Image (cartoon, rainbow, N blue to C red):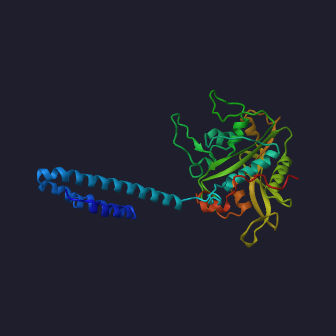
């Protein structure tokens, strides 16, 4: 029997000295692969006599098995060492501060809407809502729009396809239908929409929401936001409207010296009607409220038209009221210096990172009502 101890000792030493898995695999192929030295010894058994094979066969097979076991053990040791090195390299120092994470921010429109609602809530107003998709009655007829009014035309209003009953729904052009849904006392069909939330006078509500018109430029977008205000009570007059809006403007712009003026105007749903301007300074490419000698129109309002009270089942001889509408996005532009309304809807996180608000900020302006 041939002595293979020298070969085994040499291969064993090389296996133990293998520095990595790649080197170990090279040794395995050199020893046990098809062209390996141990595989060559196994092939030589076919050329031996039967008596020689009886002694050489077990010796060569034993050599192969011992080398295979040593290679397996060395492979396990190298894999464990590689894993330890990887874990050590990826170790986290928990005493260090965590890397900063991007935080979500409140969109300026929602921030300003919350500010406006908070101010009116302190005046005793509650919040009402209505659907974005309206019918002709709530959006136009009940609000005293005549049949041929331009707002009823396709170039001003987004109309939907007629339904099975032939009625064309539309995307509401203002939040004023909320007034109707709160006041309406008559012509209520069985199974009326869930937004028909009736309220007995006196009424004092604001209605925020999205509105839609066919318009688009730096200060107009097809979809924007309004906040509607409505007060219904006995002996209400324009003085109440003017005080309410003056108080709101001073609180919203956080300036006690804001000067306002009312100009006669026409709205189908109020009579008399007025637009309200605030005094401002337009120098240096900016608009500063509460200074200067220029004027800026910011809202419209007036006394609720008697026809609307009648359409909603209220006696105009007993109940009076005022209504007003504010553009939420436009007030945000004025207060926080945003030049282009279209950026509000561009979905650019860089813009939101610059103009956005913390979700944990108090929406109430700092100054109080005077």
Q: Which image quarter holds the N terminus?
A: bottom left
Query: Does residue 145 appear anywhere in the picture?
Result: yes
- Give the x, y percent position of residue 208: 70, 46
| Residue at left offset 86%, top offset 61% | 257
Q: Quadrant of residue 107?
A: bottom right
- Is 272 placed above or below 339 here? above
Q: Position of residue 236 (x, y in %)?
A: 84, 42
Q: Is 191 placed left or right of 77 in the picture? A: right
**Left or right position of 40 against 239:** left
Residue located farthest toward the bottom when viewing the structure as drawn: 284
286 to 102, vertically: above or below: below
Comparing 234 with 141, the one in front is 234
**Which residue is more in the foreground, 141 or 66?**
66
Q: Position of residue 81 (x, y in %)?
A: 46, 59
Name the quadrant containing residue 125. top right
The answer to which of 126 and 246 lies nearer the viewer is: 126
What residue lies at 76% left-to-right and 43% top-to-bottom? 230
Q: Is residue 272 visible?
A: no
């Amino acid at each position: 029997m041939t002595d293979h101890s020298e070969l085994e000792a040499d291969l064993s030493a090389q296996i133990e000295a293998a520095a990595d898995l790649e080197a170990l695999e090279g040794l395995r192929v050199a020893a046990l692969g098809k062209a390996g030295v141990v595989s060559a010894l196994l092939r030589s058994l076919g050329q031996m006599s039967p008596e020689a094979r009886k002694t050489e066969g077990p010796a060569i097979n034993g050599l192969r098995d011992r080398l295979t076991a040593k290679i397996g053990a060395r492979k396990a040791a190298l894999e464990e060492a590689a894993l330890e090195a990887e874990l050590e390299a990826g170790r986290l120092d928990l005493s260090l501060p965590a890397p900063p994470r991007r935080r979500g921010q409140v969109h300026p429109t929602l921030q300003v809407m919350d500010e406006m609602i908070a101010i009116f809530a302190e005046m005793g107003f509650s919040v009402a809502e209505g659907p974005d998709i309206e019918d002709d009655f709530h959006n136009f007829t009940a609000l005293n729009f005549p049949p041929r009014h331009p707002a009823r035309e396709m170039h001003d209003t987004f109309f939907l396809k007629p339904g099975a009953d032939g009625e064309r729904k539309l995307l509401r052009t203002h939040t004023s239908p909320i007034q109707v849904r709160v006041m309406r006392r008559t012509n209520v069909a069985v199974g009326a929409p869930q937004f028909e939330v009736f309220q007995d006078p006196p009424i004092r509500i604001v209605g925020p929401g999205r509105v839609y018109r066919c318009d688009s430029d730096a200060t107009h977008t097809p979809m924007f936001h309004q906040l509607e205000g409505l007060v219904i009570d006995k002996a209400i007059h324009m003085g109440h409207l003017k005080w309410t809006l003056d108080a709101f403007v001073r609180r919203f712009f956080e300036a006690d010296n804001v000067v306002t003026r009312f100009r006669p105007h026409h709205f189908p749903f109020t009579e008399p009607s007025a637009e309200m301007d605030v005094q401002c300074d337009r120098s240096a490419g900016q608009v500063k409220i509460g200074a200067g000698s220029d004027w800026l129109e910011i809202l419209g309002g007036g006394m609720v038209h008697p026809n609307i009270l009648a359409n909603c089942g209220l006696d105009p001889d007993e109940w009076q009221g005022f209504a007003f509408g504010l553009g939420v996005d436009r007030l945000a532009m004025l207060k926080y210096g945003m030049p282009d309304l279209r950026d509000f809807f561009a979905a650019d996180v860089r813009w939101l990172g610059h103009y956005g608000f913390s979700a944990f900020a108090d929406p109430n302006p700092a100054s109080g009502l005077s």
